[in-house]
Amino acid sequence: MKELRNKVIYQVFPRQYSSTHDFKGVYSDLDRLEKLKVDYIYLLPIHPIGKLARKGSVGSPYSISDYRSINKDYGGASEFLKLISECHKRGIKVIMDIVFNHTSRDSALVNESPEWFYRDEEGNLKNRVGDWSDITDLTFDSEDTYAYLINTLKMYLSMGVDGFRCDVAPLIPFDFWQVAIPFCRGINKDVIFIGESVHLGFIKYLRDEGYECSSDSELFEYFDALYDYDAHYHFEKYFNNEGSLTRYLEEVESQEGRFKKDYCKLRYVDNHDFGSAFALMKDKNKVMNALAMEAFLRGMFFIYNGIECLVDHRLDLFEIDEINWKDYDLEMEELLINLNTLKKDEIFKDGKYNFEYLNLDAATIKISSLDKEYYGVFNFDYSKEVIVNLEDGKYLNILTNEYIEVKDKKIKESLKPIIIKI
């Protein structure tokens, strides 16, 4: 929904977030997140992790042994409630990760309701897809499954949770969301649902295998925001030297005609699956330009913990791999504060976008409303001048508070991202 388009969501991996690997390490840092102008924090799964077929020494948080318990290693339910309270004191809302496609192979539900799960011809637990050997899939063949999972959502709403990020949402039967989401909104009309939609190729693969898999257009009937994997695939290809920046921007622009008018996508440079933007781009200035471009695009700005330290690898899902906050970069912090402050402008809810395909390796984008206009320049090849659709003169870059010069409709040097208020 468009009301989320000028909001900022910050993804937190509690295990890797601090040296204590728990909720305390998160809520002790909330003053910094408030300073960054974050609207929501989104927590990776916070439940106990299965032991059977566990990957690594501590296991994936997506291999859940009990949906209705809070991981004691994080501090349990009491510390989770304190985290929610501390967030709310600062005007920050809390989104939790909901993983209803599968559980661990030794989960409470596998033991209590074994008939709810996929089996092979010999009766062994199985998955529909993937090498997820530490988990097993629910079938959703029973109304009891629906009731149990919906009541689980109800339980967390009663604890003060403000929203849910739904793991691999397209793999879960669409009629589950048709029931679950309106039910939750009957309890809290402001609860938000973010769906982890999947790559187009994955949708086709699942459908070819005979499984149900919802498209983004279907999910937007009930979800408030979806992941950007339909376009982000081309973002990855560009930075892997396998595609073009123009193709990525064309995919983003095409969303304007493919989805409902008030659609909202998450815009990001990395997340816990995608990995490190710095590892991909190997250049701090490119990361800064990419962050600014994603914040500027239509949609909710999504930040993954550690980008402030230019983490150079994907944080491990199966081992302790904490963020090294000693590498905290104050220039990155300043950029995020400025971007997140700008993002609060109402223009980002329903402003008119114009994508200008003037350069091969620089994005020039304009957003306008009746009373204002912003012009963004995001350059990924510093050896080239950037062609812009601006009159010659000097302009204030509101991200750096420095003036840049346009001469012959070109900017000669643009290492840092540029946003100009016209």
Image (spheres, rainbow, N blue to C red):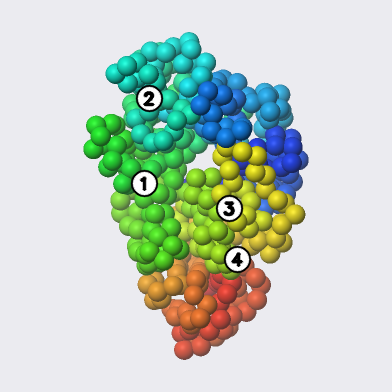
Mark 4 vs mark 2: which is more N-terminal? 2
- Residue at numbered disc 4: 284
Compared with residue 352, is residue 214 higher up or lower down, i.e. above or below?
above
Mark 1 vs mark 2: which is more N-terminal? 2
Which callout, 4 or 3, points to the residue nearer the camera? 3
Looking at the image, can residue 5 be seen?
no
Residue type highlighted by circle 2: Lys
Residue in the foreground of this view, choosing between 145 and 117: 117
- Residue at numbered disc 2: 126
Picture coordinates of residue 173, whole percent (x, y): 34, 28
Q: Regarding mark 1 in the picture, which secondary structure is present there?
A: loop
Give me the C-alpha separation between circle 1 and circle 2: 23 Å
Mark 1 vs mark 3: which is more N-terminal? 1
Looking at the image, can residue 278 be seen?
yes
Picture coordinates of residue 220, whole percent (x, y): 37, 40
- Residue at numbered disc 3: 313
**In the image: residue 123, left or right of residue 226:** left
Residue type highlighted by circle 3: His
Picture coordinates of residue 409, whole percent (x, y): 46, 84
Which callout, 1 or 2, points to the residue nearer the camera? 2
Q: Residue 240, which numbered label? A: none
Compared with residue 301, is residue 74 higher up or lower down, i.e. above or below?
above
Mark 3 vs mark 2: which is more N-terminal? 2
Residue 1 position by quadrant: top left
Instruction: Name the residue at 53% across, 50% down.
Output: 275
Mark 4 vs mark 1: which is more N-terminal? 1
Q: Regarding mark 3 in the picture, which secondary structure is present there?
A: loop
- Residue at numbered disc 1: 199
Number of residues whose C-alpha sits closer than 10 Å to that of mark 2, classed few (under 14), some (14–19) or many (20 or more): some
**In the image: residue 130, left or right of residue 90:** left
Give me the C-alpha separation between circle 4 and circle 1: 27 Å
